[in-house]
Image (tube, helix red, strand yellow):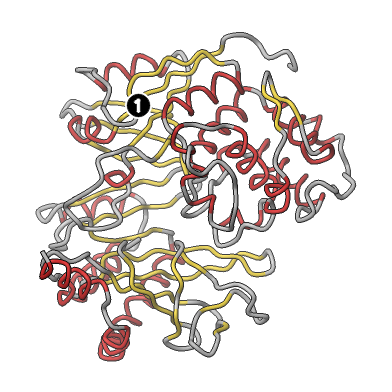
Amino acid sequence: MSFINHIDTLAPSQHWPNIPPAAFLNNLRQNINHPLRLYEGISTNFCAYAALSYLVLHTNPLGYAKCMVGLYTNGQSKMEGVTFRPSEKIKQVAGTLRFKGVLDIRPADQLWFLCLADHFKGYLNFFSRRYIKEGDEDRLWASVNYAKFNRMAKQLLNLRVEAAGSDLIRPWISDLYSYIHSRMGTGTVVLYLNNTFLYKKSHTTLKLGVPTHYVVLEKIEQDDTGLITIVYWDYGARSLRQVTPAFLKKIIFGVSHCTQKKQHADN
Amino acid sequence: MALLAAVTVSSCSVPKKTLLRYYSQNQTTLDGIEASYKKLYAQKPFSLGFSDKEFNYVSITVITDSLQYIYEFGPQEEARLADTLVKYKLNAPGIISLVSKMRAMHCTWINTVDYYVAEKPQFMIFLSTRPVAFSAPFGYKQYYILAYFPEPQYFDEEGRLYASKRRRRLRKINNEVYSKINDRVCYTISENFR
């Protein structure tokens, strides 16, 4: 925080014409002070980048702040082994995304999510590798398959990631609750879920049986009746809900257990 | 096969005038639900809906500063619902009455959505309904969505909702384009109820 506090003002960036410096700095300060308020935006495919940002803001906030200031002032920047060189289109679009809830007024978050989606590619991005037009943030261009998420966590945070699961088949774990619970004490657990069951949006009985959403698990407990209480973070807030073991097994396609490999050089 | 396709296509293109007629016939009740929710939300934030198409399972999200509590209550769990509302200091009689009104009108979901005008947050009320007439066999389940804004909005000649007076960008909510019912109330037809 002291790094950001020492930056009183920034000159308007030539690289990011739609991001005023004051709003950028304000957004950075807010993220570092209140990392849980980070919001991926309504209807975007930024949930994986938001989950990754949760890890970044909790494990390496200084590295994040330096990377963001570097991106804003120089148009490119480095974090751990990753060098971000965002495309010209991204630089034009950042700051102009609208109708995404509070993301509308958070230009630094728009910049960050767009840079992550622009840099990291997986097989889901094969036919949509470049941001072309407004709305691509809601489409395949920004989507994140499971291997890509784990790779991002490893490369950007130098974390050790133990991953169980895949994009199509649920993890082969008989007692999912015990598996997840045992990993909660030693690192951060990110769940890859089928969102159509977690947040029901229609009453159709035919639902796509694939995962599309990432949440950070903060707590998991099972009571005497077998009911499981989970507390997870997504969409800028913590949510608590009670689920049955069968429901939990039905929605989870991936469990990523992220632990620190080494102390960050910046700290 | 052709028949199946025809049924599907016809059920997708629900005429907008049906929706307008539906609103006009039920305006007092629908606006009453919105007004009740608005009053109750001001006391303590929450969102409310039904997770099944028979309107038996009540889904409620209680919003606090630190956590969102997401609960679901089955048809035999009215007492548990009331206890939970009391536990979180919500207006239990008011919300139970709202649940009844929503069930009677086949309202599937109501919540508050934030949107931004000149960088300032504003809040609209999002209400979705699933009239029985929509349950066409093989068809998509479509929902009437009503958006209640606190201020008069901007529209073009076709009645489409715009983000500002200059009418440069359509204001989308959950990626849907909305149309005018009156200055403050807009509608769309969606495949999703939230």
Task: Give coordinates of residue A102: x percent, y percent.
Answer: 58, 55
Task: Give coordinates of residue A187: x percent, y percent.
Answer: 47, 17
Q: What chain letter is assigned to the residue under label 1?
A: A
Does residue B53 sit above or below A1 in this rendering? below
Quadrant in which the N terminus of chain B appears: bottom left
Q: Secondary structure at mark 1?
A: strand
Residue placed at 39% from the left, 28% from the top? A219
Left or right of residue B22, residue A48 in this image: right
Left or right of residue A209, residue B37 in this image: right
Please name whichever residue, B108 or A91, is drawn nearer the observer in this view of the structure: A91
Farthest top residue? A262
Task: Give coordinates of residue B113: x percent, y percent.
Answer: 47, 63
Which residue is under mark 1?
A: A254
Quadrant in which the C terminus of chain B appears: bottom left
Where on the picture, by quarter, is residue B96?
Answer: bottom left
Task: Give coordinates of residue A33: x percent, y percent.
Answer: 67, 37
Determine crowd level at label 1: few under 14, some 14-19, many 20+ residues with C-alpha closer than 10 A.
many
Does residue A261 sit above or below B181 in this rendering? above
Please give the count of numbered marks on the rendered protein: 1
Please name whichever residue, B19 or A85, is drawn nearer the observer in this view of the structure: A85
Left or right of residue A165, residue B76 in this image: left
Where on the picture, by quarter, is residue B108?
Answer: bottom left
Residue placed at 90% from the left, 47% from the top? A11
Residue placed at 64% from the left, 48% from the top? A110
Where on the picture, by quarter, is residue B151?
Answer: bottom right
Does residue B49 sit above or below B26 in this rendering? above
* Badge 1 amino acid: Gly
Left or right of residue A73, residue B183 in this image: left
